[in-house]
Amino acid sequence: MSRLLKMCFLLLSMNHAEITHSQSSEDLPPLLHKAVEEVIAGKYLNGIFGPVFYYSSNVWTADLLKKVMAYFHAQEVMFTLSSLQMSIKSYLQNLLYQPRQLLSELQQLDQHQFQTAMKYLFNSKKEHLEMVNIIIDWGKTREIIFQSPGVNRTLFLVTLDKCFLVLSALDCVDILSQVLRVSAVNYLQPDVTGSLPNLLLEDAFRNLSSLFKDLYDRTSASTQRALYGWMKKILQKSYNMSEFNESTSWVSAESLWILGRYMVHLPLEEILKISLNEIRLFISYDNATKQLDTVYDITPELAQALLERINSSGFDMRNTSTIYRLGLLVCFYDDLEQMDAAVARTLLHQMIKCNQLRGFQAKVHELKSQLLNIALQNQTLNDTLGSLSDAVVGLTSSQLESLSPEAVHSAVATLNQVCGWAKSQVMILSSKYLSYEKVLSFYNMSQMGALVTGIGTQLLHSMNPRELAQIIRGTMSQYLSDLSPAQQQGILRKIAASGDFSSSVKDIQGAFFKEVSLSGLWNLTGYNYSMLKEKELRSSQALYLYELLSKENYPVDLLSTGQLVKGVTCQVIESMDTDMFLNNFKFFEMNLHLLSPYQVNCLAWKFWEVSNTSIPPFLLLALPSEYLEYVTGPLCVPFLERLGKTGMDLLNPSHHKRDAVLQKVQECLNSSIADEYDVDLLGNLICHLPPAFLHGRMSLKAMAAALHQFKLCQQLNHEQKTEIKYKLLQLYGSSNNWTAETTLDVGPFIALLSKEELNVLTVKFPYIILQIAKTVGAVSSAEELLSAVFQSVSNGTGSTRLSLSRADCLRTRAPSSNEIIKLGEANVFWSVQELKCIDPGTFDKNVELLGAVSGFNSSQLTALKEKAKQVWGLLPDWRSYQIISLGRIALALTDQEITELDLHSIDTVAVLSQQTGWTLTQARAILQGFLDDSGQTISTLKSFDLVGLGAVLCALNSTEITSIRTAEFSAAIARIGLLFCTTPVLRQFKKMTESVFGATTSWNGSVLQEIGTIAGGLNEDELKAFDKSLIPYFQPSAVRHIPPEIFQALSPEQIANLGPENAAMVTGSQRERLDAAQLQSLGLALDGARTSSTGTQSTAGSLQEGQTPAQSSAPCLSGFGIWLCAVFTLRLPF
């Protein structure tokens, strides 16, 4: 029996005990007497904290409880099961599910009650409370409270409102710290600073300022500015204002230390007035470097003003010690005249931090280039390579090619720690290093660090298997997930061929394990569930391993691994008895993100079957639409809350029920989003609300709180964005009047503004607009914004650059490196002529940036390809790293040009195959080029070759496919199953699959998951022959690739078993071929109807009259026992 029930039975028995003597208030201690009176008056919250406060300093006895009950009888207060039970039950629901009411009631608590509430919520270290022989799980109670976003907001607001008046300031700061770490970005809005105390003792102010500094990155720009204003106001009060005049500043060294990152909000003129003595003190402080290392959002103007003051205060700006103290200010160092090489190298060493800056990377890149030139004065690149820090990333391919193997070997300890390498650069450096070492070994690879990604697949495959096994087990394993699929397959294939596959594979951790083929797993022995806890699994692997391990292990052990939940079938779920299911449901709930919508649907039906009165409300979404009717009243809050955290797509991927679900969401919100509490509750559900609802039903107060959440939405449609723009203009006014902070907070939504509005913002805040433009993606989603950025950057760089090498470029303005780096996706607005006129050096240095631009049209890509031919020479002479660096530019290569390239390396082909947009003839040219240059035939291809070829495999003909070796195809089959090839090609792959897994009649769920789109190559008879229980295990992409004339062969029973996700993937052309019965079955699948043959069919009418899901009877049964049960547990009886 649970402790909670024991307590309730004790109280219930006391409640029914015969009370024969009269009871007066004098027999009760004052605090308890007051609490009892509060309960009689219906003020249950006030009544709760009276006994708790009394208990904190007194001993409870059974006799005392009898006195309390006797007092109730003396006051002729008659409790009945129906009235008091429902009253308190409703009251407690309202507190948790109506946090606005909780806020009101907490504000009405007196000093003692508020102190008690805060003490037990925030400062009590007790996990359990005891009263007589009653034990309360207080730790669990707190956990429930803090999981509710609405309750957390209430605690935040009431702390601001009451805490500093009642408790010590240090205690209140500690409470704020606990609450704000849950969701600072939502709670800390600019207007909150009006509720912060204007007078605080020094320790409390320092602690609260420190908290705000810790939360800096989790607050909006406007909030950061408001918090700076609050800190400034308090700091100015400590300044001797009698000494103040217009030429002096209130900012002291101590003020700068306290402001921390907020110092970037100091006005430029204020920085220039700071006393030189105070600047000297600040920079001399040991923690100054740490502080200046975190000013990620400082602007060049502020940074240079600070550098000027530091210089004026007497520091030698070229002294190594001073440079080390400058933090991120070094990113804007501008005194380069007559600098010696040693100082330049010191600056470069410090500038490794500059990639953390918010923007200004073009300036940083330019400064690094200048310092690099100084550092190389009178020295060779070979001699200085190890002392150039991450400036080496700015070296061109030709400069890296010029390095000697000895220089790379000597500098590898520096090179392997540098971030930001391009793939082509890593290939060059790896090749140089290994040409020095001659032999690739575990030791050599461990020295290379991140450079291992540049090692060729063939070279990895040629390694000693024991060395590879060491890599898997050792510290090098952290880099395995960075390898390409082809490289990973090369390692696995070599280990598999060594005969030591079982022991080695078990040591593989993380995502790398997903590359192990299903057929490979079949050949392994000695599995145990504990070894899977650090591995990521594909669904096919999980299905096989769960079935295998379930023969000798309990479900609780298998489910506790996390990843194995992917392998739980509906049959397994349905076969669990009630206790087993309810006890293990927590594992499914914790790993909901790992489950398929079909599995969630099965869980929902199972829960409905075994305990429909306690089913978590969010699972009702996975059931047919009519079950949403049960989401009413108190169930609305947990329904919305969990749905907002989980995401609607996982629970219901179909648009079929979306309207019904959104209608229920609107009902639960009382048809409006009134304030920030509603925004908290909605979570990411806000991304799905219809435009009309956003337009007419969302308050501006709610919009202010929702902006951050809207920015996280991935798939807002045009109509939703239009309404968001409308709300933003209502909230902030005309964009012509926006501040820098407002512009930053609006972020990517500035792309919704007109060209004229964007031009105004671009002129006012060029750095901010550039920063935002880097985050908006392709030109199709933000054309006006990227166009405005292009105009701003190109107009701001002044004179036309002339090309002496081409007569047709004399009057054409060519793109510079600085512009290309700044523009990102906005490079798409260069004309074809301008791209033709890029300086060869500029092209060579920036080819990878240009190749990453997704919006270039075919003419622009052709111009860039021609520039590559001009810079690099004849196509046969192009090196692998050059071909790789082309990115999308490679799509402009003609079939003939592709055949001229050196494509002997599968790594080169693997990068090319990742580009989307190849024509069939281009893909065929790449395939033939690889075969010819590598000296292979289709029959000699290894599994890593197949993986590297990727989408190029779709260009194979039927004869070629049949000549692939079965063992190699088997190892690569999961990767091949990701390809979107034509039906004839898929049919040939299906035939090959039968040579691996046997006839289609023997395939199970794990095989169907493994082969992916290959299942789209099944013929009509094969498809019809599948048992309906296997249909859900077709991958969604496979369903989409089944030709309509084949898809129509599915029986109504098979279609009904597709599952919600697969049903949602049925195409219009497939649907057109279905008859009425099939269409009805498709509707059932989309709706989440139950189709399993096991278990009884439950309907929405199964609930008993008056019951609703997740509202079971309260454990506290009657009278005063109910109240005390509420008082001493604060746990909701539902």
Image: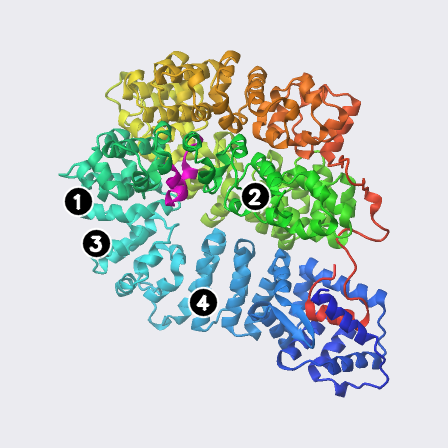
User: Relative to the observer, which residue lies in front, 751 or 30?
Assistant: 30
For this view, does 455 lie left or right of residue 370? right
Contact between marks 4 and 3 (CB within 8 A): the answer is no
- The quadrant holding residue 835 is top left
Q: Amino acid at mark 3?
A: Thr
Does the residue at mark 1 contact the one at mark 4 (Cβ under 8 Å)?
A: no
Q: Which mark is residue 403?
A: none
- How many other residues sit within 10 Å of disc 2, few (<14), some (14-19) or many (≥20)? many
- Identify the residue under disc 3: 320
Q: Is residue 662 visible?
A: no
Mark 1 Cα shell of 10 Å, populated few (<14), some (14-19), many (≥20): some
- Residue beneath disc 2: 563
Q: Position of residue 776 (x, y in %)?
A: 48, 37
From the top left corner, tell me how far across and down residue 209 is, in percent: 44, 64
Q: CA distance from mark 1 to mark 2?
A: 54 Å
Taking depth in this image into account, of 906 and 1109 the one nearest to the observer is 906
Place residue 900 in its image quadrant: top left
First to last magenta residue range: 468-485
Residue at label 4? 207
- Numbered mark located on residue 341 in the image: 1
Dot 2 lies on which element?
A: helix
Q: Amino acid at mark 1?
A: Ala
Q: Which of disc 3 and disc 1 is earlier in sequence?
A: 3
